[in-house]
Image (cartoon, rainbow, N blue to C red):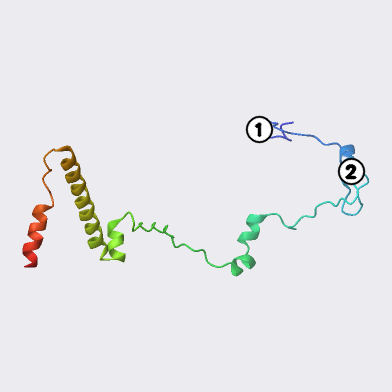
Amino acid sequence: LLKLAPGGHVGRFCIWTEAAFKKLDSIYGTWRKASEAKKSWNLPMPKMANTDLSKLLKSEEIRKVLRAPNRKVVKAAKTKPNPLKNIKAMLKLNPYAAVTKKNAELLAAKNIAAKAAIIAKKTGKPVPVNKMAKRNAKAKKSKK
């Protein structure tokens, strides 16, 4: 047993008898004789005559035909920044986007101040200080 399964580990060791092989031939047939039990069954033919793949790959005939290996390391492409979320990417595409964004912020601040003034007027409370008044005064001076 040790000669058949070296190392003493049998694993899925299975002994086939001659009668078992003959029974397999009758069930599946051979390449010369068709199967008795399975109709229209063909034994699969081996694709390779020489199954020593490492020897085949090392042979000169194959080495001549193969192209040289590509040893260049390909870096993964960086993901492109989203211009709607990344202001630097947006400014690269559209330099006027900074002006548009600033105007949108100023308009929003103006609307909030106007709404606060209307609420203060209705409730009778004092009007909150306009944070934009200082900037507006500076803008008027620079226009003159």
Q: Residue furthest bottom?
A: 64
Looking at the image, is 90 positioned above or below residue 1? below
Which quarter of the image is occupied by the C terminus?
A: bottom left
Helix, strand or loop status at disc 1: loop
- Residue at x 27% of width, y 59% of height: 88
Q: Which residue is mark 2?
A: 27
12 or 76, which lies in front?
76
Instruction: Count residues near mark 1 (Cα–Cα under 10 Å), then give few for <14, some for 14-19, many for 20+.
Output: few
In terms of sequence position, does the residue under pointer 2 or pointer 1 come before the other? 1
Question: Which amino acid is tagged 1?
Answer: Gly
Find residue 98 and report its image quarter: bottom left
Residue under pointer 1 = 7
Give amino acid for label 2: Ile
Q: Position of residue 119 (x, y in %)?
A: 20, 42
Q: Residue at x 10, y 61 (%)?
A: 139
Residue at x 92%, y 44% (from the top left corner): 37
Is 118 placed above or below 10 here? below
Q: Quadrant of the N terminus?
A: top right
On residue 29, which mark appears? none
Q: Calculate the distance from the C-alpha at mark 2 to the C-alpha at mark 1.
A: 35 Å
| Residue 129 x, y percent position in the rendering | 10, 45
- Give the residue drawn at x 44%, y 63%: 72
Q: Give whichever of 138, 51 is nearer the camera.
A: 138
